[in-house]
Image: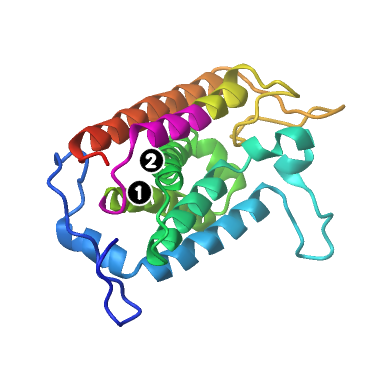
Amino acid sequence: MSDRSTSWLPSPPARPSVPRYVAPLPAWLESVGLRFALPIVVVNLVGTAFGFWYYGFHPLPLSDPPIVWQFAGTPPAMWVFVPDSPVATGFIALALGLWLVDRQNDYVTALAFLGCWKLGLWTPFVLVAFADGFLATTPLPMYLFLFVSHLGMAVEGFLLYRVSTFPRRAVAVAVGWYVLNDVVDYFLPIVGTPHHTLVPGQARLAEGFGFTHPSPTHEIAAAGAVFLTVTGAALALATARSRPQG
């Protein structure tokens, strides 16, 4: 259990000795991030709410149908696989929130790390790879917001090794979840068509659920996702190896 001050600013746990590639952020930046964990939790919760709205859950404005855009074109049974980035920001909000109340959960933390690594870098990757298509339909301020905010996800993920030892069983659960996401997003959708975040060139099918997945856009997006799942798993396991396991 970490030491706490009487202030609303928590005292970060001691920085363990780990390889630089596991902890690329400066120690002072990690400590600032953990001291301001509560605002980071709030920002990520706001990001989660915005993300669900972005994918098509529209309680507001009242003039919209409640379900639009990608949610509307996806079978409800597969909705859990659609809002990948909002789920990742929800995981890190929950991971840091649980740490703040001394109920840290290794499974949530591992899911948060892998999600922030994968989605924090996949979105900038496709925004650059398909920049012409995105900029043709996305206002520049929104494009830049999506780019910078997702990079921030990847950065904040590197705070988490300070609050968890990344037990291998927790890493295995996180890897299993994101491998399953890759399978249904790109290779075997189970119901409907693949469920990855829509990228330029896709269109909703005229009948039923699903979207077109033109080549080579689909393959490029898939390659980025699989690469980040593999590298994220390797980083999480490297963190586990470098931390004493309880």
The label number, if any, that marks residue 157 in the structure image: 1
In percent of the image, x 58 and y 43: which residue is there?
136
- In terms of image quadrants, where is residue 60? bottom right
Which stretch appears magenta?
162-178
Looking at numbered disc 2 in the image, what kind of residue is underneath it?
Trp
- In terms of image quadrants, where is residue 5? bottom left
Is 109 covered by the magenta stretch?
no
Q: Is residue 145 left or right of residue 71?
A: left
Is 171 covered by the magenta stretch?
yes
Q: x, y (%) of residue 147?
A: 44, 49
In percent of the image, x 61 and y 59: which residue is there?
49
| Nearest to the observer: residue 216 or residue 22 | 22
Tell which residue pokes out farthest to the right in this image. 207
Q: Main secondary structure of the magenta part?
A: helix
Looking at numbered disc 1 in the image, what kind of residue is underneath it?
Gly
| Vertical relation: 97 (above or below) 57 | below
| Vertical relation: 182 (above or below) 159 | above
Q: x, y (%) of residue 242?
A: 18, 37
Is residue 74 visible in the rendered image? The answer is no
Quadrant occupied by the N terminus: bottom left
Q: x, y (%) of residue 133?
A: 56, 37
> What kind of element bears circle 1?
helix
Q: Is residue 222 left or right of residue 54?
A: left
Q: Are marks 1 and 2 in contact (CB under 8 Å)?
A: yes
Q: x, y (%) of residue 168?
A: 34, 32
In percent of the image, x 32 and y 50: which residue is there?
160
Q: Is residue 22 left or right of residue 74?
A: left
The colour scheme is rainbow
The label number, if any, that marks residue 117 in the structure image: 2
Q: Is residue 145 left or right of residue 160?
A: right
